[in-house]
Amino acid sequence: MPEFNLNESKCNSCGTCSSLCPTGSIQMNQYPHQSPDSSCISCGHCEAGCEGGALQINNPNLEPPLTNISSKISPEELGAYMRNRRSIRNYKNKLVSPDTIKEVMDIVRYAPTGMNSQPVKWVILENPSKVKELSSICIDWMKKEVENDSPLSQYVPMESLITVWNTGIDPILRGAPHVFIATASDSSATVDGIIALSHLELALPAFGLGACWAGYLKMAATGYEKVNEFLNLKDDSFIGALMVGYPESKYFRIPKRNKVDIRFLD
């Protein structure tokens, strides 16, 4: 289990590290120490919450904690940013640079995961021709579903999608230059992957990018092994995907939404 180093000269014995530890692995005497039955998950809350920087977790996978967190986003600014999120289905014929992708994903990797397990992996299609090939595989799956008159083909307009595809338009991945796919070795990590994808979708507009959830791809990945073979997932599970690119159009208004449905329990 990870252990931590304590610089006693910086520690004021305030006990914040102990109170922040989600697993109760830090106990207080004169100074904090790791309990004998510690179940530390390397979440880093003790490091992050120590004002004097007295604690450091011994985990080679962790980076030095960030300290530049003084800037504050106002509720109004955050609200405007999040309300302006749109599902982008039309993209410019422009690739996203590898450096920009890395910068975006460096933000997304901080999405929360259960017990700090960090199980989410990513498959990113950089080449638009690969994106189109993946769409073609999804169409092949839909053709089989229609031929077999499957219940899903009655629910999803597969025949219409196939017809549109035959005209040269991609109704599956919408001509997006890139697709970002969240996967995990642990099949129970679905929620972690969806949270990470949501973080990705919210981060992208800050880089001038947009995204749309690839629902048809998710359906195909669930019912057609050739999708997983194409993505070389092997033992990993497909969680979900986003089409990603530079939006072709701008939005000038926020669409109306239903009022929030809340029930308070006292």
Image: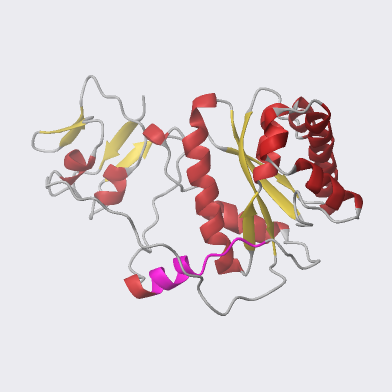
The residue furthest bottom is 252
Query: Quadrant of residue 21 in the image?
Result: top left
**Res. 74 visible in picture:** no
The vertical placement of 91 against 164, above or below, is: below
Residue under the point 48% across and 38% down: 192
Q: Position of residue 120 (x, y in %)?
A: 55, 37
For the rendered model, the colour scheme is: secondary structure
Counting every numbered tag in the picture gives 0
The answer to if 82 sits in the magenta stretch is yes
Foreground pick, 88 / 139: 139
Q: Quadrant of residue 149?
A: top right
Residue 238 in sight in this render: yes
Asked if the stretch drawn in magenta spans residue 232, the answer is no
Q: What's the magenta region? A: 77-88
- In this rendering, the answer to whether 207 lies above or below 129 is below
Residue at left offset 68%, top offset 33%: 152
Give me the residue at 66% from left, 22% from top. 235
The x and y percentages for residue 254 are 50, 73
Q: Nearer the viewer, residue 159 or 252?
A: 159
Q: Relative to residue 250, is residue 144 drawn left or right?
A: right
Position of the N terminus, as image quadrant, is: top left
Q: Position of residue 10 (x, y in %)?
A: 20, 50
- Residue 144, position in %: x, y? 82, 29
